[in-house]
Image: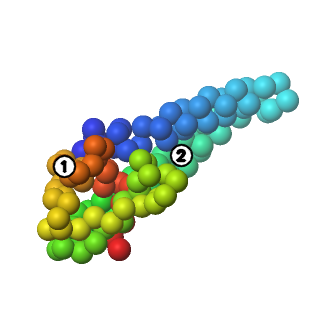
Amino acid sequence: MIGKFFYLEGAYLILAAIILLVTLFVSTRPFVSPGAWKKSLPVVALILAGFIGAHFWVTVSRMASVKEAFEAGKPVLCESRMLRKMAQSIEIRKGTSSAWRIEGDNFVSPHYTRPFHLARCIPK
């Protein structure tokens, strides 16, 4: 679970670290009251942790609903990074001629070179 967290939220964790560094820099400037960093840094860190945690929870919940819909034979829409100019999404359905299956957190098919991550999909 922790590996999935770092995979899905890694970019946001890096952005949060940058935001914390900026907060530390700004709160230690001479025009800010002394000791402001002691108050601002924990508040900003708590807010960022809340946002990142909420985003992770929503993403994992959506991934579970996508997996359920796929197993039930319902269509799933996934973002296509290969076909940016023609189609922005692709419809995936279990049991169709394209032989879609789930491997880990990815949809894979022998007809497509790239897998589709469940986090980039929604049930239709």
Residue at the image position 24 percent from the left and 45 percent from the top: 1
Identify residue type, mark 1.
Answer: Pro
Left or right of 85? Residue 82 is: left
In which quadrant of the rendered view does residue 99 lie? bottom left
Question: Judging from the image, what secondary structure is the residue with disc 1 in?
Answer: loop
Residue at the image position 35 percent from the left and 74 percent from the top: 124
Question: Is 67 positioned to the left or the right of 120 in the image?
Answer: left
Q: Earlier in the sequence, mark 1 or mark 2?
A: 2
Q: Residue 4: horizontal and vertical position, in percent?
A: 29, 43
What is the x, y in percent for residue 109? 21, 52
Q: Nearer the viewer, residue 70 or 97?
A: 97
Residue type at the position of mark 2: Leu
- Residue picked out by circle 2: 48
Foreground pick, 83 / 104: 83
Q: Position of residue 76 (x, y in %)?
A: 31, 67
Q: Is residue 16 left or right of residue 58?
A: right
Q: Is any atom of residue 74 visible in this view? A: yes
Residue 121, image quadrant: bottom left
Tell me if I can see residue 68 in this picture: no
Q: What residue is pinned by disc 1?
A: 110
Using the image, determine if residue 42 lies above or below residue 92: above
Question: Residue at coordinates 59% horizontally, 31% vertically from top-left?
Answer: 18
